[in-house]
Image (spheres, rainbow, N blue to C red):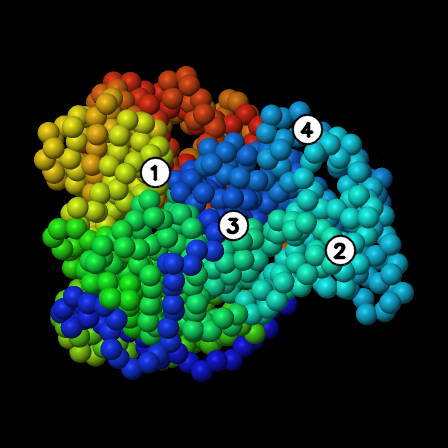
Amino acid sequence: MPRSARRSPKARRLVGSVAFSAVLAGTALTGPVAHAAGPQVTVDLGRTTGAVMHGANGTLYGLSDVGVPGDELVTPLHMTTVVQKPQGGAQHPNGDALTVKPAFDRAGGGDVYVYMQDDYVQWPYENLGLADYLSKVDRMVREVAARPDADDFVWVPFNEPNGNWYPGLGSSDSATYAAALRSFKSDWTTVYRKIRSIIPDARIAGPNETHYDARLMGDFYPWAKAAGVLPDITTWHELDPGSLSSFESTLAAYRALEASAGIPALPVSVNEYGNRRDQSVPGQMIQWMSMFERNKVYADQAYWNIAGNLNDNAVQTNIPNGTWWLLRWYAGLTGRTVQLTPPQSNTIDTVQGIASLDTGRKQAQVLLGGASGSVDTVIRHVPASFGRKVDVTVERTAWSGYEGAAAAPAVVSRTTATVAGDGSVTVPLTGLDAMSAYRITVNPAGSGRPAAAGLPWSATYEAENAAITGGTVYSQGSRSNPYGFATSGTKDVGSLNQPTSKVAFTVDVPRSGVYDLDVFYGNQSGGPATHTLTVDGAPAGTLTYGSTLNWTYRATASIPVALTAGQHTLTLAKGTNEVTLDKIDLTAATARDAVYPATYADISGSPSYDYSASGVSGAGALVLDRGDKAAFDVYAPSDGYYTVHADYASTGDSTLSMDGATAVTLPATRGRVTDKALRLYLSAGNNRITAAPAGNSCLTLRDLRVTGAADTTGVTSYEAEDATLAGTADVSGNAWSSGGKYVGHIGLGAANTLTFQVKAPAAGRYVMNVRYANNQVAGSGNYNTNVVSRAADISVNGTTDTVMFRNSYSWSNFWDLPVPVTLKAGVNTVTFANSSTYAPDIDKVSVAPLHG
């Protein structure tokens, strides 16, 4: 059960000073910087520790349905493992292994672990006897046995046996323990042999305890070897913050057990790790991920809340939060990991990290985070092939809450550094935010200098430190309460349910101008809520808060605020419904281009890297020949058209593709570097844009840059209430829908449909944004919230595809889901249907060509 924790209130935190010390002084960094000794991360590029494994990017029930989460979020992560339930299992309403497998394969995924006992409905699992379980085992294994991809599956016969059918395994009474151990050994043998009788070479994982139990492991492994029922993969769970200090000794103890029993080193998979206070927080997750990558084991984030959101890292189907970008960085590590020594090893909530070196790319990367304050990152033995001058880029991905959309990581600094005589470069970072993670990228410097970069002024103000009227301060997730939800400062303000409830923040800004106010909140009121914002008592606007999973499942709401230099009082007063408040972030509003270096992109084929010119990003250029591709992950804050610049040179035509269709052709430049401005439609969240040369051309690409705000000129919207309804489909009113109306009761019969007549100016690929609501849940005895995705069979001119719509937490919470469609010139018939169950409620659709 959650436990409360006390911690001294966190003072206002300035986060705009994270940068190279030398950059702040207005000069280039030239080797190690002389300053007072402080915490130091040492990265030794001369000591490799093995190929980058990407083992820590697994997910337990992170995938729930076809397209939930979307390919735009799954593909970039290169997940090595997922853990799901058997097909048709009753433990949860979704997450079936065979259902999610096609999307996982499209994303280049690895192994699918099957929690076999999740066939049962209750938690802890109901025990109906071994015969009942064997019949289930027989069915689920035979479903997979005939598949050509049967060897992609790993079978987990028992999940947390010491907490389910064999609780005596944790008993301090020797007789009780011995009896439970005999029972477990007998059942393990029976189920193991049953699986192997159907798939002789099946991979079987276990024992899958709630934690590593040295007594059980010491009794189980020598016996399993002798009995011929040894697991192929060793699994257990690490869920407590203490694992961050004890895991390496635990793993060492297990390896010693293997050696003493004469067992070759088996793969280890910690197939549940982390807790609620960790998930969604980049500064927490980097500690776990670095620990597992360093020790070359596989690991899957634990499933505490809902399925289908990548363990609290997918805000909506295609919208990422801050930790998704950390996972994307992790997926982007290439080559070999290298020795990284943190200031304190195996210590909870301290700076930890991962580093890699790819000599082919001439690129070194360091991912770090986990504490506030300052740290020097000393990168030693920079390869001679990098040259004496290197470009160094520092980026930050901040905590945006579980449900707060996060833009691409902010660039803290870009600079050109001279490698010292001992082959080192020192990167001092100051003003670190403990909930954020950071990436340092080093590559050879070319001609020119990268564009200057830095974070805008920003400050955080905790709600618990503000003036509170009609509200209560609560303690939330912390080291002593890891089951509690992540909260800035470990506290929030709730019970703001009185007509007079308000929270007044005293802020102090350095200069007059417009500031972005981001409010971190929770809303379990059953529908959207509002606050009235006043500045120094004068009306300044209304914030609308969408529904969230619960009161402490943080999302963000934003509004621009004009402030004069100096101190002000910003008050959030109760409007409609109730919310909880965690903190506010106030950031100077600045127009900044988002730059996506080509040398950071995902690649296929065998492109080469050119660092002869630094370019805007300081990252050089990617050279793509026939058969090569580069995929960029481009973020958009809202749906609409943006100006996307391609900085490139090409000997012939090249293409940029989205949604599997060519969005635009990049014409030949005859060797000249060209800045090509393109008008492309980007959906809110992540957009996967792929660049490739056409024919035998060669494309040299420096970066993609996105400028300007979203423009909806050329987007055509169609209200659902104006479309053609058939059967039970009907129009209802809702103040939170577009035009105050929506269409419900679509589906649950083939005749119950909604049909739009959509006009297209030309034949081609379009994005159809479907605005919908869905709050269906399924009851269960487990602790998860079992949200259900609803399906709509969408027919475009007679061609039908099934699209899944994730739960939006309220029937009044309308979300947009982008659906790529191919339209003919003129009028197109688009029908929503579902013959077996209800489709989501539909508010409207908006249609736009991929490029303008």
Q: CA distance from mark 1 to mark 3?
A: 20 Å
Q: Which residue is mark 1?
A: 603
| Discs 4, 2 touching: Cβ within 8 Å | no
Give the residue displayed 47% in from the left and 55% down from the top: 49
Of marks 3 and 2, the one in the foreground: 2
Q: Is residue 81 above or below residue 831?
A: below
At mark 2, the secondary structure is: helix
Q: CA distance from mark 4 to mark 2?
A: 32 Å
Q: Which mark is residue 145?
A: 4
Give the residue displayed 34% in from the left and 38% down from the top: 603
Q: Which residue is mark 3?
A: 55
Camera sees residue 594:
no
| x then y, percent, for residue 693 | 24, 28
Say few, some or many: other residues with alpha carbon within 10 Å of mark 3 (under 14 / 14 to 19 / 20 or more).
many
Q: Which residue is mark 2?
A: 261
Of marks 2 and 1, the one in the foreground: 2
Say few, some or many: other residues with alpha carbon within 10 Å of mark 4 (under 14 / 14 to 19 / 20 or more).
some
| x then y, percent, for residue 522 | 44, 62
Q: Quadrant of the N terminus?
A: bottom right
Q: CA distance from mark 3 to mark 4?
A: 26 Å
Question: Horizontally, is 301 left or right of 363 in the view?
Answer: right
| x then y, percent, for residue 316 | 42, 46
Camera sees residue 602:
yes
